Amino acid sequence: MAEPKPGEDGAWYVYKCDAGGTRDAFYRPPVWIPDGPQADDGPPVSPAALAEQARSQLRLPSPKIKASPADEQLVTLPTWLWLERSAWRRVTATASVPGVSVTAVARPTSVDWSMGDGGSKVCHGPGTPYRPSEASKPTSNPRKSSPDCGYTYRSSSAGQPGDAYPVSATVHWSVTWSGADQSGSFPGLTTTSTASFRVAESQAVNTGNE
């Protein structure tokens, strides 16, 4: 006697004569009959449903935090902040079924910096890397601030866990989709990178000539 396979759809059937025939004395056990094959043509998949699938496939990077000074920040001396430029880029993912293809696109738009001392900074880009070659110029000003993403600490990190401030950079991503002559957008996504900044009391900086 056939038994149902795990997960198989079907039903048990019992032999029964109910149309005026001659009833016999033979016992016939129930018979398992699986459902027949379903038609391949299911309901069409909507572009919006494919867009959801494409969105779930997005793999967003968490850019590494960079700062200058590199090893230790100084109280009252401007800190330059930036993220790895290679990770500041659009990210795409595509979902398809026969005849329909939809692509989701995530773009970084801004960064929320939490500096660990209670202060914060919002930057509308990855920030500008500090170039060490600039520091060697005679006209270099060590107190020059970053043109687009910087912060100045007012107290040292001494006494903090590890004598350092926990710093985080949360990148906000806008997400849109398009395909099959349709388009739309999703609620934004975020990724967060972390680092620890040691901040020491700064010494007087003499930028003039005696």
Image (tube, helix red, strand yellow):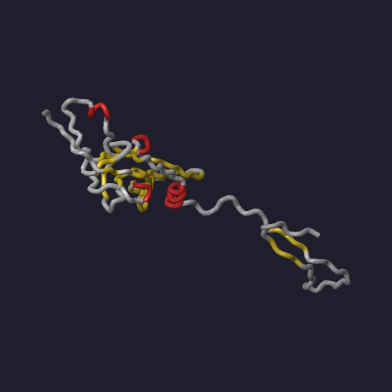
Residue occupying the point 70% across, 58% down: 34
- State the residue in front, 184 or 210: 210
Q: Position of residue 96 (x, y in %)?
A: 48, 44
Is 203 left, or right, of 180 in this rendering? Answer: left
In the image, is residue 69 above or below residue 122? above
Residue occupying the point 12% across, 28% down: 209
In the image, is residue 9 above or below residue 91? below
Residue occupying the point 22% across, 38% down: 146
Q: Position of residue 188 (x, y in %)?
A: 35, 51
- State the residue in front, 1 or 39: 1
Residue 172 visible at all? no
Q: Position of residue 66 (x, y in %)?
A: 33, 38
Residue 30 visible at all? yes
Q: Check the picture and name the quadrant holding the N terminus.
A: bottom right
Q: Check the picture and name the quadrant holding the C terminus.
A: top left
Occupied quadrant, residue 2: bottom right
- State the residue in front, 83 or 92: 83
